[in-house]
Structures are given as C-alpha cells and as structure tokens.
Image (cartoon, grey):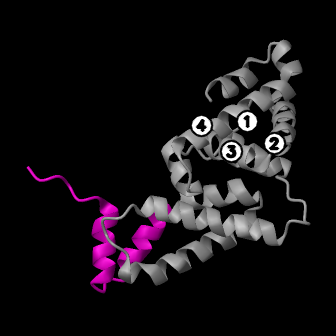
C-alpha cells in the first residue's frame, strides 16, 4: 500500500497548478507556529504579526518554484527566524521585553483560584526576569522549547544548526536559570523545578 502524501505537498502542488485557495489553507495550517516563533524572538505582539506577514509574503513568492517534497516547516522556521533576528539587529538599541500580559499568555490559562493565581503571577514575573537575562541564543532556544513547544529538531531547523548545538544551548540555559532561581528552588517551589526538569 502506497504511503499517504503529506498535506503540505498536496497543497503546494495544487497551488502550483493554479488553485489559489491552496495557499490560504497552507497559511492557516502553519500560521500559529510561525507566529509563536516570531513572538519568541521579537517578544512584541505587533512586530510578531508584521514578521508573520513578511514570512508568508516570501512564501507566496517562493511557492511557484518550491519543490513540493521539501520540508515546508523547516523553510518557514528558517525564514521566520532569520527575518526576526535581522529585525532585532536593526533595532538593537531599543530594549525589548515581554509585558506581564504577554508573559502570562505564554504560561497558559489561569486558574480561578485567587491565591494560586497570585502565586503564579509572582512566579511568572520572577521567571521572566531570569529568562530575559539569558544570553540571546540561550534565551531563544529556551523559549522556543518551553513556551512555543517546538521539538529539538524543529528548533535546529529553524536556527540552521545541529540538534547537538540546540541541546547545548538548552542545557546552558537551564543551568543558568537554576543558578538564578536557586532561592526559589531551595524554598520548595516545585512548579519552577518542574519546568526546568523538563529540559
């Protein structure tokens, strides 16, 4: 029995045969992950939206000659990451940080319990400061892994490096965070340790 053809490959072929709607479907299926990657690097909602728009404009231009069997995920991540890093370099004198609202959205839905919610908010601010103090590549890898939930392979493809390099950056980031958050860990904050342990 023949293996099923991946949906991306089918949609790319349809687009190349003149079916414009195929591009809309490709964009819809990849939009969230591209946005998550852009946000992880740029740490700004509006800039991330602009970056996503640029990435899909580039995809639309590239798609007529794009080999359908190529890894579209890897292409999108690489183009998005390169665009975002270039954008950061052009604006290197502007300090960019996540707002508390942005950070809380990265943490996932809040609980309805006020005491737990207050504790998580305090903890999120502490972790946010520690993550933002990491060297850039360590910070990007850590956020892509733990907040954007990309796999090691996906991060390596996006950053154009080996999985070993990603693991090394992630290991250093985790070690740095353990040092910076040592006081919380010593106080028995299991929710901090559980995040770092998953590295």
User: Marks 3 and 1: in contact by CB < 8 Å?
Assistant: no
Relative to the observer, which residue lies in front, 165 or 45? 165
Q: Residue at x 69, y 53 (%)?
A: 40
Mark 3 sits on what residue? 143
**Residue 175 horizontal side relative to residue 34, left or right:** right
Give the overall secondary structure of the magenta segment.
helix
28 in magenta: yes
Label 2 environment density (alpha carbons within 10 Å; few <14, some 14–19, many ≥20): some
Helix, strand or loop at label 4? It is helix
Q: Residue at x 28, y 77 (%)?
A: 14
Q: CA distance from mark 2 to mark 3?
A: 11 Å
Q: Is residue 48 visible?
A: no
Earlier sequence position, callout 4 versus callout 1 = 4
Mark 1 sits on what residue? 173
Helix, strand or loop at label 3? It is helix
Helix, strand or loop at label 1? It is helix
Relative to the observer, which residue lies in front, 129 or 65? 65
Give the extent of the magenta segment: 1-30
Earlier sequence position, callout 2 versus callout 3 = 2
Mark 2 sits on what residue? 134
Label 4 environment density (alpha carbons within 10 Å; few <14, some 14–19, many ≥20): some
Of marks 1 and 3, the one in the foreground: 1
Earlier sequence position, callout 4 versus callout 2 = 2
122 in magenta: no
Q: Residue at x 85, y 21 (%)?
A: 182
With respect to residue 115, does 2 lie above or below?
A: below
Label 1 environment density (alpha carbons within 10 Å; few <14, some 14–19, many ≥20): many
Q: CA distance from mark 4 to mark 3?
A: 13 Å
Q: Quadrant of residue 134?
A: top right
Q: Give the percent coordinates (x, y) of residue 59.
A: 49, 76
């Amino acid at each position: 029995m023949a293996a099923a053809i991946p949906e991306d490959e089918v949609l790319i072929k349809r687009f190349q045969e003149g079916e414009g709607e195929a591009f809309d479907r490709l964009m819809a299926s990849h939009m969230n992950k591209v946005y998550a990657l852009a946000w992880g690097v740029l740490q700004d909602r509006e800039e991330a939206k602009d970056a996503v728009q640029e990435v899909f404009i580039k995809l639309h231009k590239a798609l007529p000659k794009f080999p359908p069997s190529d890894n579209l995920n890897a292409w999108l991540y690489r183009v998005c990451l390169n665009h975002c890093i270039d954008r950061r370099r052009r604006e290197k004198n502007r300090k960019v940080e996540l707002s508390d609202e942005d950070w809380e959205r990265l943490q996932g839905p809040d609980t309805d319990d006020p005491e737990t919610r207050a504790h998580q908010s305090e903890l999120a601010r502490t972790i946010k400061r520690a993550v933002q103090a990491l060297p850039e590549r360590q910070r990007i890898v850590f956020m892509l892994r733990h907040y954007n939930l990309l796999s090691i392979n996906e991060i390596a493809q996006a950053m154009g490096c080996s999985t070993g390099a990603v693991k090394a950056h992630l290991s250093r980031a985790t070690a740095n965070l353990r040092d910076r958050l040592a006081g919380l860990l010593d106080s028995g904050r299991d929710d901090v340790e559980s995040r770092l342990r998953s590295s």
